[in-house]
Image: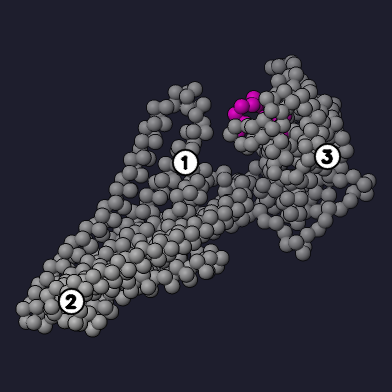
């Protein structure tokens, strides 16, 4: 089953409610309840101190003009009253500074914890997906989901969610304070919120559409970048720099244009709020001036409302900025959700239904049986057709056939990188779908034509993080005749390898892959063109080692050089996914079929190859 295509942007589909998308991430807050509750509790005193400050300044104006003042200021000398108000203002500023710092730290910590947990879950999910997914998904797109999308999602919690709650509480407290002070001016400012809200909703909707497109273009950009960095040798050897540069420039321009649209809509919100804020101050001065002239209010109240008009729209401006952040976060949630909703095709069985390996009557293990196996990478396009064969414990079998015959597909099915479309595969009498993948892959050791090495030392690339002693590592190296090669390295087993083992030759990397399998002592050994990158001298060394490693083990060998499979017990000849011949080297030559033709052709072209 192919992964579903990415959905269209929000403007062209029935998207989930934004808050429902946010609720899907609430489980990640469970481990941060104390920090969340603490940060929310601090919002109320912070909002109160923010609302009190304009009142204090208004009282200072009233004291200077000898108008109505608070009760405890009545009768005080002007200088003493002003000093008292100054100390109150300083105390409120210090209180707000200290507690806003604490609250900001708590919120950021929650956001970082959630981001880390989401990233871990995505990584676990992606690494559990089948090879089919990676065959159709560019690496750059995955990197974008794991980095920038997750960061955008983290910002929703770190600054967005709590920040929006903070702004809402602040606005409500200011509105209550304004109505307490003077209801007419309060109504004027509240009415101005209505058109502002409508404009913000419109521009944010447009921003959401543009941001989704920008994320898609960024994924394409990262994909091209990753592809060109990985294949830089081919790019340079075939002089593709200019052509690839033009491709990158085109995608980069698309990304820039998409980002420009997000900037326009974001800027439109900021400009609108700036304009409305100035209109609000003008409106307060107009109506407040009339009320002052009518002696309905004094200058202290008017001064307070001028500050209130600014403070009312400041959180609204911040709210709009956070809303922009929310839109980016919602886009990220959608994209991450699309990734997390891709089903894991190859699942481990229920532990209660797990069937242990059966012991073969001879006491040996490593029997492999394909029963009516059909398989295709795409629905209806089969690369393996009705395969039926049994490999006995300890038997050495070679897979031979033209390119595209299905040899590597058999290995991928046996290792359960894919599941058969039809039929079943049994190892020691147990369907591999009833065996946990970790046990199956410990039971089967695979050496590919090109082995991947990780950044780290030689020992770690052999153990792959498992707890093997240095003696075991050295024993595996000696068994595969590579101990001398490792000891000749600058720091021996502690030699640090660069990315993909760039400081080793292809042959040396392959030698480490042999030791990596040998240390695990699998019952089944699979060699997929494993000696193709080795020179003749090293190949002879490895062949001697393989004779020891394959003792009492089932072995499946894929090789184009027929010299490596002459001595196997049986040779399976494949053509277009079907098993058409089976037998020993001599038997197949006598049949004068496909194998004999391949052998003669290879002998004709390169006598030393056979």
| Upstream in sequence: badge 2 or badge 1 | 2
Mark found first going from the N terminus, 3 or 1: 1
Across and down, in percent, residue 299 comes to 13, 75
Could you say which is closer to the camera, residue 518 or residue 106? Answer: 106
Q: Provide the secondary structure element on which disc 1 rests.
A: helix
Residue at numbered disc 1: 223
Badge 3 element: strand
Tag nearer the camera, 2 or 1 = 2
| Residue at x-position 30% and y-position 66% | 90
Q: Determine which residue is flagged by label 3.
A: 554
Q: Secondary structure at mark 2?
A: loop
Name, please, the residue furthest toward the right: 362
Q: Local crowd at mark 2 within 10 Å, few (<14), some, or many (≥20)? A: few
Q: Position of residue 418 (x, y in %)?
A: 66, 48
Task: Give the alpha-carbon distance from disc 2 to disc 1, as whole Å.
Answer: 73 Å
Residue to which mark 2 is pinned: 77
Examine the structure image and report whether residue 506 is included in the region drawn in magenta. Answer: yes
Tag 2 and tag 1, C-beta contact below 8 Å: no
Identify the residue at horizontal 50%, vertical 50% (top origin): 146
Return the residue nearer the eye: 429 or 194: 194
Seen in the image, is 151 located left or right of residue 301? right
- Residues shaded magenta: 500-513
Where is the C terminus found, in terms of image quarters?
Answer: top right
Q: Residue 117: x, y in percent?
A: 55, 57
Label 2 vs 3, first from the N-terminus: 2
The quadrant in which residue 305 appears is: bottom left
Residue 602 is one of the magenta-drawn residues: no
> In the drawing, what numbered circle is on residue 529?
none
* Above or below, 157 relative to 416: below
Which residue is outermost to the left?
A: 293
The picture quadrant where one finds residue 351 is bottom right
């Amino acid at each position: 089953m192919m992964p579903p295509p990415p959905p269209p942007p929000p403007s062209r589909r029935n998207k989930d409610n934004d808050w429902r998308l946010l609720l899907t991430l609430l489980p990640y807050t469970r481990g941060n309840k104390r920090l969340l509750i603490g940060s929310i509790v601090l919002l109320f005193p912070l909002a109160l101190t923010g609302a009190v400050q304009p009142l204090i300044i208004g009282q200072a104006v009233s004291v200077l003009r000898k108008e109505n003042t608070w009760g405890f200021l009545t009768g005080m000398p002007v200088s003493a009253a002003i000093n008292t108000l100054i100390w109150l203002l300083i105390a409120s500023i210090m209180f707000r500074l200290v507690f806003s710092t604490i609250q900001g730290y708590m919120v950021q910590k929650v956001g970082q914890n959630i981001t880390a947990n989401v990233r871990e879950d995505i990584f676990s999910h992606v690494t559990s997906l089948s090879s089919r997914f990676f065959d159709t998904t560019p690496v750059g797109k995955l990197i974008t989901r794991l980095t920038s999308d997750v960061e955008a999602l983290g910002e929703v919690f770190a600054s967005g969610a709590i920040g929006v709650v903070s702004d809402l509480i602040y606005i409500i407290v200011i509105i209550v304070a304004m109505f307490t002070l003077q209801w007419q001016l309060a109504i004027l400012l509240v009415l101005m919120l209505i058109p502002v809200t409508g404009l913000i909703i419109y521009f944010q909707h447009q921003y959401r559409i543009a941001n989704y497109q920008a994320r898609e273009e960024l994924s394409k950009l990262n994909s091209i970048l990753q592809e060109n960095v990985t294949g830089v040798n081919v790019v340079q050897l075939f002089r593709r720099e200019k052509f690839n540069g033009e491709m990158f420039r085109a995608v980069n321009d698309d990304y820039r244009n998409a980002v420009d649209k997000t900037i326009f809509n974001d800027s439109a919100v900021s400009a609108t709020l700036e304009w409305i804020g100035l209109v609000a101050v003008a409106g307060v001065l107009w109506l407040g001036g009339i009320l002052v002239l009518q002696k309905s209010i004094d200058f202290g109240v008017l001064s307070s409302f001028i500050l209130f008009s600014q403070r009312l729209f400041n959180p609204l401006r911040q709210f709009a900025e956070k809303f922009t952040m929310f839109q980016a976060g919602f886009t990220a949630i959608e994209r991450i959700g699309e990734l997390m909703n891709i089903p894991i095709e190859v699942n481990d069985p229920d532990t209660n239904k797990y069937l242990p390996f059966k012991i073969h009557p001879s006491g040996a293990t490593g029997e492999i049986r394909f029963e009516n196996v059909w398989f295709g990478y795409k629905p209806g396009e089969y690369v393996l057709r009705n395969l039926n064969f049994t490999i006995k414990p300890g038997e050495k079998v070679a897979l031979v056939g033209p390119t595209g015959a299905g040899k590597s597909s058999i290995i991928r099915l046996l290792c359960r990188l894919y599941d058969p479309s039809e039929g079943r595969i049994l190892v020691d009498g147990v369907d591999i779908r009833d065996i946990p993948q970790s046990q199956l892959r410990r039971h089967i050791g695979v050496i590919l034509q090109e082995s991947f090495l990780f950044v780290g030392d030689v020992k770690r690339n052999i153990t792959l993080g498992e707890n093997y002693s240095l003696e075991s590592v050295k024993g595996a190296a000696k068994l595969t005749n590579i101990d001398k090669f490792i000891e000749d390295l600058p720091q021996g087993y502690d030699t640090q390898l660069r990315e993909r083992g760039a400081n080793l030759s292809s042959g040396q990397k392959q030698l480490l892959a042999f030791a990596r399998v040998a240390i695990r002592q699998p019952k089944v050994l699979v060699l997929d063109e494993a000696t193709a990158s080795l020179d003749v001298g090293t190949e002879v060394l490895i062949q001697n080692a393989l004779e020891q490693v394959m003792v009492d083990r089932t072995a499946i060998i894929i090789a184009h050089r027929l010299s490596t499979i002459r001595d196997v017990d049986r040779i399976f000849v494949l053509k277009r996914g079907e098993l058409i011949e089976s037998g020993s080297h001599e038997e197949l030559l006598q049949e004068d079929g496909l194998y004999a033709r391949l052998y003669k052709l290879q002998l004709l072209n390169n006598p030393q190859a056979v």
